[in-house]
């Protein structure tokens, strides 16, 4: 496999720095890949018209004295983040002309870091589902199996990077929207610590509501841990427009020489798929082979943590986004929203203050757990990737879908960094796990995940679109 688009992000940057290849050549290869594969997958809503001009300008300027890890590397951005001159539609037809003049911090950082943005990736309506489809841009497909969801809401981003449309994809994660798509598409991501990557949308008329801000993050998706690390370095550059950004190097914990990883096959009050149990066993065996100490642990208040996420978020959505969704969302989207509302509790003022207090207590309890272990391994989802648009086709199964995502929701409430990486294929469909770290230990989590990856390998190379090129 010697196609430019099969190169990792780090390999691409290295070959550009050695002048083995020009940025224009790399960009042209990824644009050609996009033109060849996107008609079938429908993951790119809008090619970025100036991509080749950007590449030519970077080549003409020559290498900077200290080129960043994504200098010249093609990337994609998601259509729910502001990018100058391109709509932030959030998958909603009413917002299709919402282009503005400014870049969100994460987009600005990618450009400043020398990345070449080649396309914008699809998202579900209001970025609130576990599949990636909307009335404006249609249905995005999973390259492993078109009947299976690519995940949501960054499903198109994960599918794009899996097939080589960009070496890095930008996504975001409020309830699992980085980790679940990576899980479904057999690639790798990190849900960074809260505040690691600066976030805001400068072209939007209103600020994001406060609970969403504390549970949502921006982050990278790649085909390897090394690529995710490189992209996070660029995405997390300081931007004064986010006063909540945190530049902490790590958690400051003192560690023993032996790294201890706690794990739980299923700490939640919901059934676990045997395929997920297999993924956990592969990860546990891989970590043991890599020299880690393993300990079976029970994380504190796991179910309560996950369900508090839903109660707080849906209370906020009810008071902020509900009118817009009811007015501009499709009937199917509104049916899904109602199922979410039926699943979680609406909190009054006293209940919301109590929930915010309880959130701090839960964060403290997990922080104490990390005094005894260095990382925590658990499933990414309790179900193998589900049928595409299952929530639209069978709304009665939405409670089951939500229960499967309890491992995702818990981490969003806590704000912790979590690396999701694939373990294997089962019946041709990817499975994987997530490695959760204490707050601000993003780089440590990536380093340890890379050691696991070195034992169990990556799986993207087995996609038919790659194997045919061997």
Image (tube, grey):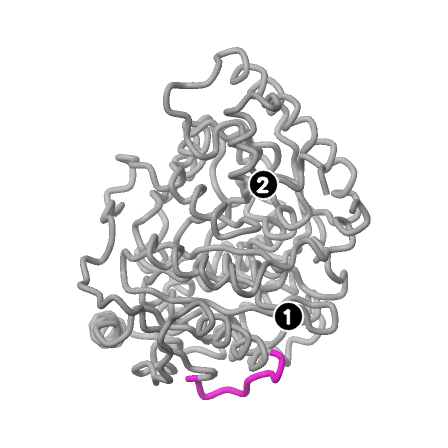
Q: How would you classify the magenta stretch by its main secondary structure?
A: loop
Locate residue 256, reporting x and y percent.
22, 68
Locate residue 288, reporting x and y percent.
44, 74
Displayed quadrant of residue 192: bottom left
Locate residue 199, reporting x and y percent.
36, 44
Query: Along the horizontal axis of the image, is 414 left or right of 102?
Result: left
197 vs 403, nearest the viewer: 197
As measured in the structure, the alpha-carbon distance from the residue carrying label 1 to the one carrying label 2 is 23 Å
Residue 377 painted magenta: no
Query: Along the horizontal axis of the image, is 107 left or right of 29?
Result: left
**Mark 2 and mark 1 in contact (Cβ < 8 Å)?**
no
In the image, residue 48 above or below residue 136: above
In the rendered image, the quadrant that contains the N terminus is top right
Q: Which mark is residue 385?
A: 1
Q: Which is nearer the N-term, disc 1 or disc 2? A: 2
- Mark 1 or 2, closer to the camera: 2
Q: Which mark is residue 167?
A: 2
Mark 1 is surrounded, within 10 Å at the Cα level, by few (under 14), some (14 to 19) or many (20 or more) other residues, namely many
User: Residue visible at 52% across and 32% down?
Assistant: 13
In the image, residue 423 above or below residue 297: above
Residue that protrudes farthest toward the right in the picture: 468
In the image, residue 112 above or below residue 81: above
Which portion, as a residue range, is magenta? 267-275
Mark 2 is surrounded, within 10 Å at the Cα level, by few (under 14), some (14 to 19) or many (20 or more) other residues, namely many
């Amino acid at each position: 496999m010697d196609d430019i688009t099969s190169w990792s992000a780090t390999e691409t940057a290295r070959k550009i720095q050695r002048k083995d290849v020009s940025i224009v050549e790399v960009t042209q290869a990824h644009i050609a890949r996009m033109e060849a594969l996107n008609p079938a997958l429908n993951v790119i809503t809008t090619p970025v018209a100036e991509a080749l001009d950007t590449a030519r300008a970077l080549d003409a300027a020559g290498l900077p004295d200290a080129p960043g890890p994504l200098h010249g590397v093609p990337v994609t951005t998601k259509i729910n983040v502001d990018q100058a001159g391109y709509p932030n539609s959030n998958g909603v037809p009413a917002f299709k002309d919402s282009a503005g003049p400014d870049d969100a911090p994460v987009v600005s950082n990618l450009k400043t870091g020398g990345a070449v943005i080649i396309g914008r990736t699809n998202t579900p309506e209001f970025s609130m589902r576990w599949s990636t489809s909307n009335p404006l841009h249609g249905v995005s497909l999973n390259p492993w199996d078109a009947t299976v969801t690519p995940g949501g809401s960054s499903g198109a981003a994960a599918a794009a990077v899996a097939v080589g449309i960009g070496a890095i994809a930008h996504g975001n994660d409020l309830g699992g929207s980085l980790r679940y798509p990576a899980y479904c598409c057999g690639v790798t991501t990190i849900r960074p610590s809260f505040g690691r990557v600066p976030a805001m949308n400068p072209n939007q008329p209103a600020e994001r509501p406060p609970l969403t801000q504390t549970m949502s993050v921006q982050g990278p998706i790649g085909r390897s841990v090394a690529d995710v690390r490189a992209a996070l370095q660029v995405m997390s550059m300081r931007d004064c427009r986010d006063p909540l950004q945190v530049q902490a190097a790590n958690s400051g914990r003192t560690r023993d020489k032996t790294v201890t990883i706690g794990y739980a096959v299923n700490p939640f009050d919901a059934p676990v798929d045997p395929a997920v149990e297999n993924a956990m066993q592969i990860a546990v065996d891989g970590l043991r082979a890599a020299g880690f100490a393993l300990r079976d642990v029970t994380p504190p208040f796991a179910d309560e943590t996950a369900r508090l996420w839903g109660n707080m978020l849906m209370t906020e959505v009810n008071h902020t986004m509900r009118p817009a969704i009811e007015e501009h969302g499709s009937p199917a989207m509104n049916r899904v929203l109602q199922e979410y509302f039926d699943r979680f509790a609406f909190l009054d003022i006293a209940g919301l203050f109590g929930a915010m207090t309880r959130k701090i207590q839960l964060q403290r309890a997990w922080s104490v757990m990390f005094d005894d272990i260095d990382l925590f391994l658990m499933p990414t989802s309790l179900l193998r990737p589900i049928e595409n648009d299952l929530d639209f086709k069978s709304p009665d199964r939405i409670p089951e879908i939500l229960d499967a995502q309890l491992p995702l929701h818990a981490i969003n409430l806590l704000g912790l960094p979590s690396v999701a990486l694939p373990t294997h294929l089962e019946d041709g469909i990817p499975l994987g796990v997530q490695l959760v770290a204490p707050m601000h230990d993003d780089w440590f989590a990536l380093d340890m995940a890379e050691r696991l990856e070195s034992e169990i390998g990556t799986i993207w190379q087995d996609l038919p679109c790659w194997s045919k090129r061997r």
